[in-house]
Amino acid sequence: MASIYWPESLPADFLAEGLSIQPQSNVIRTKMDAGPQKARRRYTARTVNFSGKQRFDNVELTIFKRFYNTVLADGVLRFNYKDPLTNQLAEFRFTEDYTCAEIGGLWEVTLPLERLS
């Protein structure tokens, strides 16, 4: 597990709408001169990509930006976050920069993450 945790002052759940989950391929296939392809696992653990949204007020958005930019070194470092599938803590990191849009006085922030454990 990572030594960094998602801030307790921020919501810990994705919004129900807009959550997408995409397991990454963990199989390597090799074509043979004759017969069926050979297949094997690439790694012992596979990553799963998540993209979800959260709504923050102005204070929460400031906390999130500080967490992302300073604590996570612009999203590079791993952190512990609640897995939306299992509701258990798991290790995540950002796959790209977050995006945010103002909606009705709140900020809707899209978090592109990958689960590493």
Image (spheres, rainbow, N blue to C red):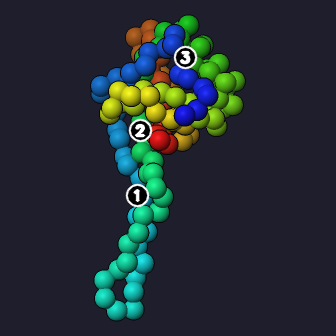
Q: Is the C-beta separation of discs 1 and 2 under 8 Å?
A: no
Q: Nearer the viewer, residue 37 or 102?
A: 37
Give the answer, above or below, for where 42 lies relative to 114.
Answer: below
Q: Is the C-beta separation of discs 2 and 3 under 8 Å?
A: no
Query: Which residue does the numbered mark 2 point to in the structure image?
Result: 50
The residue shown at (60%, 26%) is 4
The three-letter code of the residue at mark 1 reads Ser
Mark 1 is surrounded, within 10 Å at the Cα level, by few (under 14), some (14 to 19) or many (20 or more) other residues, namely few
The residue shown at (49%, 42%) is 116
The residue shown at (30%, 25%) is 16
**Please, what secondary structure does the residue beneath circle 1 have?**
loop
Name the spot of residue 5 as percent of width and height, x first: 56, 23
Give the answer, above or below, for where 24 lies relative to 77.
Answer: below
**Please, what secondary structure does the residue beneath circle 3 have?**
loop
> From the image, which quarter does the N terminus lie in?
top right
The three-letter code of the residue at mark 3 reads Pro
**Please, what secondary structure does the residue beneath circle 2 have?**
strand
Query: Which residue does the numbered mark 1 point to in the structure image?
Result: 25
Mark 3 is surrounded, within 10 Å at the Cα level, by few (under 14), some (14 to 19) or many (20 or more) other residues, namely some
Mark 2 is surrounded, within 10 Å at the Cα level, by few (under 14), some (14 to 19) or many (20 or more) other residues, namely many
The residue shown at (64%, 29%) is 72
Q: CA distance from mark 1 to mark 3?
A: 31 Å
The three-letter code of the residue at mark 2 reads Phe
| Label ID, residue 7 | 3
Q: Earlier in the sequence, mark 1 or mark 3?
A: 3
Is residue 110 visible to the viewer in this orientation of the structure?
no
